[in-house]
Amino acid sequence: MNLEETCLFHLEDINVEEIRIKLQEIYEALKERGYNPTNQIVGYLISGDLGYISSYKDARKKMQSIERAKIVEILLKEFQNKQ
């Protein structure tokens, strides 16, 4: 560590990583319950109806804690980064 340089801390990067982790947990919970996680998450994102997300392993609560627009933003950025 160079004490002469200022370190940058990006809170947004941490928030995005927390959301990624939650989305992965939600995805896995839906998969474990026998649902198609992609279809269920897309259904929720389009409709806003949390009924698409199982309450198994608190997946619904986790999804409710994330703004839908933020999920779409993250997914779009991930898509752009892979191009």
Image (tube, helix red, strand yellow):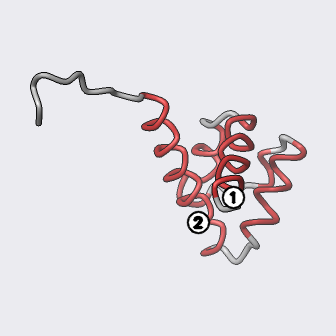
Q: In the image, what residue type sits under mark 1?
A: Ser
Residue placed at 86% from the left, 55% from the top?
A: 43
- Judge left or right: residue 1 versus residue 19: left
Q: Residue furthest right?
A: 47
Judging depth in this view, the residue of 31 and 19 nearest the camera is 19
Q: Which residue is mark 1?
A: 54
Picture quadrant where residue 34 is located: bottom right
Q: Which residue is mark 2?
A: 29
Q: Which one is earlier in the sequence, the residue at label 1 or at label 2? A: 2
Q: Are marks 1 and 2 in contact (CB under 8 Å)?
A: yes
What quarter of the picture does the N terminus occupy? top left
- Judge left or right: residue 58 versus residue 80: left
List x then y, in percent, for residue 83: 71, 61
Badge 2, how many Cα within 10 Å: few under 14, some, many 20+? many
Q: SS class of the residue under badge 1?
A: loop
List x then y, in percent, for residue 25: 53, 59
List x then y, in percent, for residue 55: 64, 54
